[in-house]
Image (cartoon, rainbow, N blue to C red):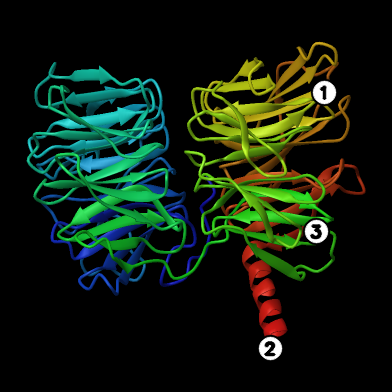
């Protein structure tokens, strides 16, 4: 397993903040990040948080929790499939965990401590909720099993374990009372849960924007409509008189327990997939370098990020320039054919919210954002049109012959007029987030977390195939070839009948050790070259032979990154740009021997600095 290497600076994270958690006395805050580290902050003065130490993992860190008994112990959970235990008092310059729980079978999404301070419950992407004895490191049993990703765990003061997942299952059990498990299914995915401090009420967040309050027997006490999009995280105030919800509308929502809204806090830099409350202080994650701290009573911001992260999420080509959409909400534009490692570049400030997808049509480009809007801009980045918020983050976008299509986190496909960006039609063919779109003939192909790949128009769609796990990306070539990348570690490539669009050849491509995030197709339909990038930090290549290819085909490694490979974009039929969350952009194409090789390297942070220097020079 390659170790992450984003080289964060001393005062913040080099990638988005995924989780936040306060120590028992509220004096310290731990923030987790996609940069593979946990920062522990002194928040005694919440207007001036001070970083105390950094705790490293080998992959992105999803969660952390302080021990309720041994208050200096912190558990951190990572996509490297380990949970590390740290003592935070008198840490050396290079801290090391005193124990690592390393027998997990998938990425760990969340952890929580049992009231005894010795046992830890961990939930993971494979749906398992496992209990561990941290005094010995031994596996102590299984608390629940979900059919899809298990997303969150919360333990009550009485030792009741609650787990929730994307399958809609809510499970409550007491590990000291075998047979005590209670289960209930929701008609929506559930990604967050938290017991009240009294232990009498469980709050769950649903992807239809509702928050339900349940008894330990999972009977509904109250339902509160919080947002028009998915509710992701929830935390209680210390006296249980109010609760805070982070939603995919990018807001913090504060309610009292009677369901009356007290505050709504919006900051486009905020990523409230995690919230925490101590005293009169709210903490939330973010897309920039530091967590957000907010006054609970007044909703005033107390401290926030100091610098953007330019992690690339999407790319497109317009007028010979490569456009790179970043977590910072900017689009970086530069000439990919230059021989300079750091060419002159332009930063186009499209949004305050992360750019998730890009498309172009020759005279303008389109950018979809986490805030749920689509922006149309001219090549200079000047805004031509923008949608109202469309109800959910927009991870995918494509330009077809007659419209712009946006895919949402909640499974919708939205048709937009390409000039004015007014909504013309909407359908919901998927039961999960539409992760990727690609033009195909008169319609388009779509890939989603419901494991399916579909083609057709907005309404009349057919399923090409299913993967064993969610599908991250889809690419097309000349209306004949479709390739998809999945969390099941595989790429599927299929040749379509030009008359019926049915699959007449199909191959499964293997090689990556982890989830495959992005895919591209080079060459011609008869002998396509498949490129795919993975969360194992590798870029892989396959040459497809439709006549002789049978069984599983292994890929050839082309390059390695310092973080997961995030997105790809064709420059022409022989070359592609490939970006990683470490900020690297590689231009790849055939070398003298015909094999796909790296031909040029760029870095988004360096490009952004070049663009800033150019602006200062012009201003001067």
Distance, label 2 to label 3, CA atoms, is 27 Å
Q: Which of 108 and 389 is in front in this view?
A: 389
Task: Determine whether label 3 and label 1 are within 8 Å by CB.
Answer: no
Q: Which of 556 and 602 is in front in this view?
A: 602
- Residue 105 location (% of width, % of height): 40, 31
- Residue 484 location (% of width, % of height): 66, 28
**Relative side of 495 to 44, left or right:** right
Task: Tell me the element at label 2.
Answer: loop
Task: Determine whether label 2 and label 3 are within 8 Å by CB.
Answer: no
Distance, label 1 to label 2, CA atoms, is 52 Å
Q: Nearer the viewer, residue 46 or 530?
A: 46
Q: At 91% from the left edge and 45% from the top edge, which residue is drawn?
A: 593
**Relative side of 50 to 375, left or right:** left
Report whether residue 76 is seen: no
Q: Please give the residue where the numbered disc 3 appears in the rendered image.
A: 336
Q: Earlier in the sequence, mark 1 or mark 2?
A: 1
Q: At 38% from the left edge and 30% from the top edge, which residue is drawn?
A: 208
How many residues crowd around disc 3 within 10 Å: few (fewer than 14), some, or many (20 or more)?
Answer: many
Q: Please give the residue where the numbered disc 1 appears in the rendered image.
A: 480
- Residue 296 location (% of width, % of height): 21, 59
Query: Which quadrant is the C terminus positioned in?
Result: bottom right
Say the numbered circle drawn on residue 620: 2
How many residues crowd around disc 2 within 10 Å: few (fewer than 14), some, or many (20 or more)?
Answer: few
**Relative side of 598 to 458, left or right:** right
Between marks 2 and 3 in the image, the one whose residue lies nearer the viewer: 2
- In the figure, 89 relative to 525: above or below? below
Report whether residue 180 is seen: yes
Distance, label 3 to label 1, CA atoms, is 28 Å
């Amino acid at each position: 397993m390659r170790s992450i290497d984003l080289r964060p600076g001393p005062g913040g994270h080099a990638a988005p903040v995924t989780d936040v958690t306060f120590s028992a006395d509220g004096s310290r805050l731990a923030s987790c990040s996609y940069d593979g580290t946990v920062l522990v902050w002194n928040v005694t003065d919440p207007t001036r948080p001070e970083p105390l130490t950094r705790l490293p993992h080998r992959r992105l860190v999803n969660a952390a929790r302080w021990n309720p008994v041994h208050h200096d112990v912190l558990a951190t959970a990572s996509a490297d499939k380990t949970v590390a235990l740290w003592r935070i008092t008198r840490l050396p310059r290079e801290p090391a965990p005193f124990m690592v729980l390393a027998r997990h079978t998938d990425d760990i999404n969340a952890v929580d401590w049992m009231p005894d301070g010795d046992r830890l419950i961990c939930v993971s992407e494979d749906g398992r909720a496992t209990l561990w004895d941290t005094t010995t490191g031994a596996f102590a049993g299984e608390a629940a099993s979900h059919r899809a990703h298990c997303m969150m765990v919360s333990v009550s003061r009485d030792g009741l374990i609650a787990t929730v997942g994307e399958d809609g299952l809510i499970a409550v059990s007491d590990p000291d009372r075998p047979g005590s498990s209670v289960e209930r299914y929701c008609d929506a995915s559930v990604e967050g849960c938290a017991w009240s401090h009294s232990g009498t009420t469980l709050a769950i967040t649903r992807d239809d924007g509702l928050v339900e309050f349940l008894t330990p027997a999972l009977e509904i006490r109250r339902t509160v409509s919080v947002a028009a999009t998915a509710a992701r995280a929830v935390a209680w105030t210390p006296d249980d008189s109010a609760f805070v919800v982070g939603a995919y509308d990018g807001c913090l929502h504060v309610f009292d327990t009677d369901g009356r809204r007290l505050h709504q806090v919006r900051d486009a830099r905020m990523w409230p997939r995690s919230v925490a409350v101590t005293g009169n202080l709210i903490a939330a994650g973010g897309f920039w370098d530091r967590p957000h701290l907010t006054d609970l009573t007044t909703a005033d911001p107390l401290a926030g990020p100091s610098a953007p992260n330019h992690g690339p999420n999407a790319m497109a080509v317009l007028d010979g320039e490569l456009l790179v959409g970043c977590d910072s909400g900017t689009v970086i534009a530069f000439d990919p054919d230059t021989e300079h490692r750091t060419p002159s570049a332009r930063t186009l400030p499209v949004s305050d919210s992360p750019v998730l997808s890009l498309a172009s049509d020759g005279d303008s480009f389109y950018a979809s954002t986490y805030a749920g809007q689509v922006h149309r801009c001219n090549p200079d980045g000047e805004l031509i049109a923008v949608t109202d918020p469309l109800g959910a983050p927009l991870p995918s976008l494509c330009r077809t012959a007659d419209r712009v299509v946006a895919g949402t986190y909640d499974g919708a496909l939205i048709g937009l007029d390409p000039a004015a960006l007014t909504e013309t039609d909407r359908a919901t063919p998927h039961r999960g987030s539409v992760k990727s779109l690609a033009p195909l003939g008169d319609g388009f192909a779509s890939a989603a977390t419901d494991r399916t790949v579909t083609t057709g128009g907005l309404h009349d769609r057919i399923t090409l195939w299913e993967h064993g796990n969610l599908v991250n990306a889809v690419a097309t070539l000349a209306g004949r070839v479709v390739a998809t990348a999945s969390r099941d570690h595989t790429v599927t490539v299929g040749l379509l009948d030009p008359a019926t669009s049915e699959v007449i050849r199909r191959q499964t491509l293997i090689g990556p050790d982890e989830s495959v995030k992005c895919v591209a197709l080079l060459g011609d339909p008869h002998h396509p070259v498949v490129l795919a990038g993975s969360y194992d930090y590798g870029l892989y290549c396959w040459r497809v032979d439709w006549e002789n290819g049978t069984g599983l085909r292994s890929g050839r490694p082309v390059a390695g990154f310092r973080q997961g490979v995030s997105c790809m974009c064709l420059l022409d039929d022989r070359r592609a740009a490939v970006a990683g969350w470490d900020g690297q952009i590689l231009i790849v194409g055939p070398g003298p021997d015909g094999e796909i090789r790296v031909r040029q390297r760029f870095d988004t942070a360096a490009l952004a600095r070049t663009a800033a220097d150019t602006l200062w020079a012009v201003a001067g």
